[in-house]
Image (cartoon, rainbow, N blue to C red):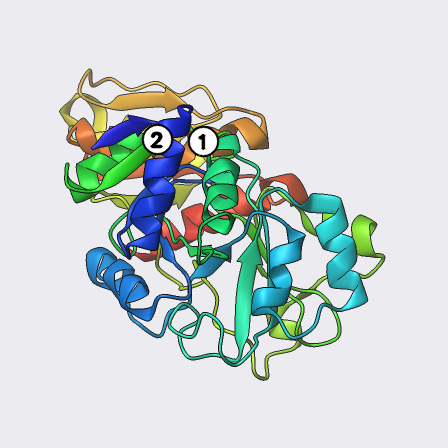
Amino acid sequence: MILDGALPSSVQAAAQALARGELLGLPTETVYGLAADADDDAAVARIFAAKGRPANHPLIVHVADSAAITHYAKEVPLFAQQLIDAFWPGPLTLILPRLPAAARASTGGQDSVGLRCPAHPVAHAVLAACQRLDPPVWGVAAPSANHFGKVSPTTAQHVADAFGDDLLVLDGGACAVGIESTIVDCTRGVPVLLRPGAISRADVQRACGLRPLSKEELPAHTPRASGTLLAHYAPTARVRLMDARQLQAGLDVLGADAAHLAVYARAPLRSASSRVILRRMPDDAAAAAQQLFAALRGFDDAGARLIWIETPPDTPGWEGVRDRLQRAAAAG
């Protein structure tokens, strides 16, 4: 059931559902999440079951404000606090040392917890309403509201299509960012980038004065984090990344016989077949991120069996999009 997330009655119904241990389709600025009370182990288990997600793969806990951090984290390093001050609410998840009794199922058995304060007004309203309950719900675990490994949802209808009418979904419109949050590990004395997103490496460094390392630079004891598997974010059709010259050469070879093929590229391309779906990718990285998952879903819906995509530029602004496409291609 989809409800208008702008209505106070919908927000209150969502908070009450979470307090009862039910699941909720929750809009955020990144993607829609499949939410449950992060401290209710039985409710969190329902997320894993609904998604088909391994129970040791941690979930991100979403909180209404930085004050809720004390319910989940043992400590907040100075550079982590600087990142919170700069980017919360927003598309940034911080991995922090976990308090022993908090969010045990949500963290996949790890001694760390991923925390994020979303910027979406509907998400914030739900989280604030949860904190006002008696007893309060301090945070919600909310991985992307899709089946594990598949394309993330960026509209309420995407969520309903995946999980049916029995799931309560708040409609908050299309997601403004469109790809999942940047994840920074703050448990090892320096910021370590585990997953790129709309907040770039350069953004992180400007905010805290420290260059974020890649996880390969500090490989020992890297915490598991959401969305970091090699194969992820995959449509049903197989994805292949190529440069513009390779894309055009492939279309020329296939000629008029090409079918069940979608091509997503920044370069203008031509095909002799009317059965090939040609779609332009935005030249702007932020716009490309916002449209990416909806475009992949659209190609599936149109019957494509193979999706050829122009490899994004190897520049900082495109890192998040490039990461998602590389993982989608690895799934094929």
Residue at 22% of width from left, 61% of height from top?
52
Residue visible at 27% across and 34% down in the picture: 158
Closer to the camera, 190 or 112?
Answer: 112
Tag 2: amino acid: Ser
Q: Secondary structure at mark 1?
A: loop
Residue 114: quadrant of the picture: bottom right
The residue identified by callout 2 is 10
Q: Residue at x 75, y 75 (%)?
A: 189
Which mark identifies residue 175?
1
- Identify residue type, mark 1: Cys
Badge 2 element: helix
Label 1, label 2: how many angstroms apart (C-alpha)? Answer: 19 Å
> Would residue 254 be found to the left or right of residue 218 on screen?
left
In this view, the residue farthest toward the bottom is 220
Answer left or right for 111 relative to 232: right
Q: Is residue 164 found left or right of 212 in the rendered image?
A: left
